[in-house]
Image: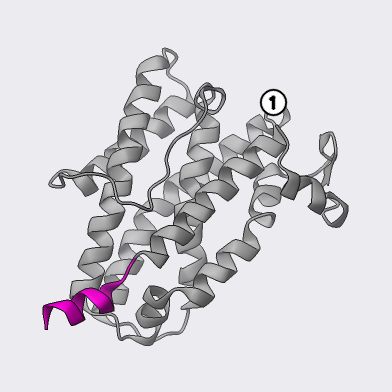
Amino acid sequence: MKCVCVCLLLASVPLLSSSGLVPGARLWDVVWGFSGLQADEILRSSAFFQELRDGNLTQRCYTHFLQQEALYLAGASRSLEALIGRLQEADETRSLLQEILKHYSSRNQSLHGPPPRWLRLSFTPLVLDDPVYYLLALSARVQLRVLMAREMLGVKESRVLQQWREDTREEVAWILRLRTLVEERQQHMDAFKAINIFREQMMNQKSFYKALACEEEEEEER
């Protein structure tokens, strides 16, 4: 189903027509183009990002961030396990799913508890029928972090910022693999579905960063 917001923007995006991608267009770029404004808004409104960039983010707040993100990764890992179990052929998609699952599992082994209030990882069966759409959804989180990293080029590194950069670099490799996979598969993918799935997860990231209320928690403990 084509989202209303996508249809309203068709006239301003020459790489997309009412029937899908125009010849020569790259789905990866089009998907990001429809969520770029959301990503910019997250950077402008996120106290976490501002404090990280300014070198004022405490280790305690960063640890809280890691704990919340690990809950997200734990939820994603369960879906990854289910998708891998359904794929019999040892192709690039299955290999990529396994790589991401291994990385996510290493980040959430010691965590237990209910998912955070901001978490939205529910997808229709139509999405889960093709794991590439699910991988594209997961990439929203990493692509936002890559954008954040670019915004902080030249910033004096604190210990917390250095740790954050290292965590981000660990995930760039699978994003590059996914981009290649999407470009190979884009002629068989629904551009509108890809846009909406990615956009929904970018909204999820907006909720995530909005929920990082480290200052409030620190004041309550004083």
178 left or right of 118 in image: right
Residue drawn at x 80%, y 53% as measured from the top left: 9
Q: Residues within 10 Å of mark 1 (few under 14, many from 20)?
A: few
The residue labelled by disc 1 is 188
Residue 67 in the image: above or below residue 213: above
Colour theme: one colour
- Could you tell me residue 10's position as x and y percent? 83, 49
Residue drawn at x 37%, y 74% as measured from the top left: 48
Q: Secondary structure at mark 1?
A: helix
Residue 13 in the image: above or below residue 181: below
Residue drawn at x 54%, y 28% as measured from the top left: 127
| Quadrant position of the C terminus in the picture | bottom left
120 left or right of 16 in image: left
Quick check: is 144 in the magenta stretch? no
Identified by mark 1, the residue type is: His
Secondary structure mostly seen in magenta is: helix
- Could you tell me residue 158's position as x and y percent? 28, 82
- Could you tell me residue 93's position as x and y percent? 48, 28
Q: Which residues are magenta?
A: 212-222
